[in-house]
Amino acid sequence: MAKTTEIAQLTRIADALERISPSPPSVPDFKNDSAFMWNATPAGLIPIEKVNRVDLSLLQGVDSSRDTLLENTRRFAGGLPANNALLWGARGMGKSSLVKAVHRAVSTEPKSVLKIVEIHREDIESLPALMSLVRKNVKFKFIIFCDDLSFDADDTSYKSLKAALDGGLEGRPSNAIFYATSNRRHLLPRDMIENERSTAINPSEAVQEKVSLSDRFGLWLGFHNCSQDEFFSMVDGYAKHHKLKIKTDALHAAAIEWSVTRGARSGRVAWQFIQDLAGKLGQQLVD
């Protein structure tokens, strides 16, 4: 009788452990989908049916960064050595748009097996689990993409990122590459680095521990505020693509007024202007 009771108790414990234990990450159909969102809990990839992105040709004023990232991505997709990339700098200048546009350009090329997976900043600690899933699907190439990546003073999850990029015994999967955008070149706030310098037993080593995170990115692509001519190029490109019925002089005059009210010139401001203008003209934007 006692033995039966013990077996029943062990069975209940086993059932309880099974319920609370994490399920293995779900694996979608990579043959039919090219873009995914990483879900940390429960772990798995969620296919994205329609990616919010613009055509590569519409990104103006970022020619050097565009060409560099496109070439790096093509090498990676073709099985050649390539670097992780950090796109840093001014807000609204097309950093995340460029990553998504480059993926689209390369993934639609003949025989391409390139996929993109977006991971949210708050899920960085689960990056090793995502890398493990990617490693098992060697037939495909994956861009792991994190938008607006940065770390606060009390945040230690940056260590998970360092380990996943090229640390540990296994290293980064050969079929994965990491692209991130950030407003900071070093991803960590300056006061955090200065605090490490002032309180550490060995200040130089402490600072290197923090700054070396950016060193895991072989490509640093800087984005800076655009000039008025570059702003006009952005507006002209959008207006032509969406077939807006307005003369160039009137378009530029309206664009200047819009940028003044926003106090900035950037790709994001140009796109917001075009959406407003299309509404005023009673025209639909082309998909």
Image (cartoon, rainbow, N blue to C red):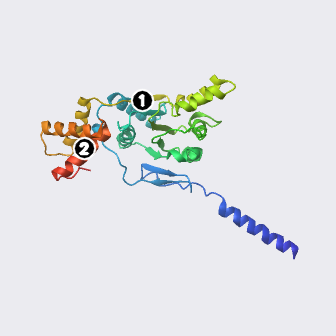
> Looking at the figure, which quarter contains the N terminus?
bottom right
* Residue sitting at the far bottom: 1
Confirm whether residue 85 shows in the render: yes
Q: CA distance from mark 2 to mark 1?
A: 26 Å
Q: Earlier in the sequence, mark 2 or mark 1?
A: 1
Label 2: which residue? 273
| Residue 130 or residue 82, whichever sits in front | 130
- What's the residue at 35%, 49% (across, down)? 52
- What's the residue at 31%, 38% (across, down)? 267
Label 1: which residue? 221
Residue 282 shown left or right of residue 56 in the figure:
left
Secondary structure type for disc 1: strand
Asked whether disc 2 touches disc 1, contact meaning CB atoms under 8 Å apart, the reply is no
| Type of amino acid at the residue the image marks with label 2 | Phe
- What's the residue at 35%, 32% (across, down)? 66
Residue 38 shown left or right of residue 204 in the figure:
left
Confirm whether residue 216 shows in the render: no
Residue 277, image x, y percentages: 20, 47
Q: Nearer the viewer, mark 2 or mark 1?
A: 2
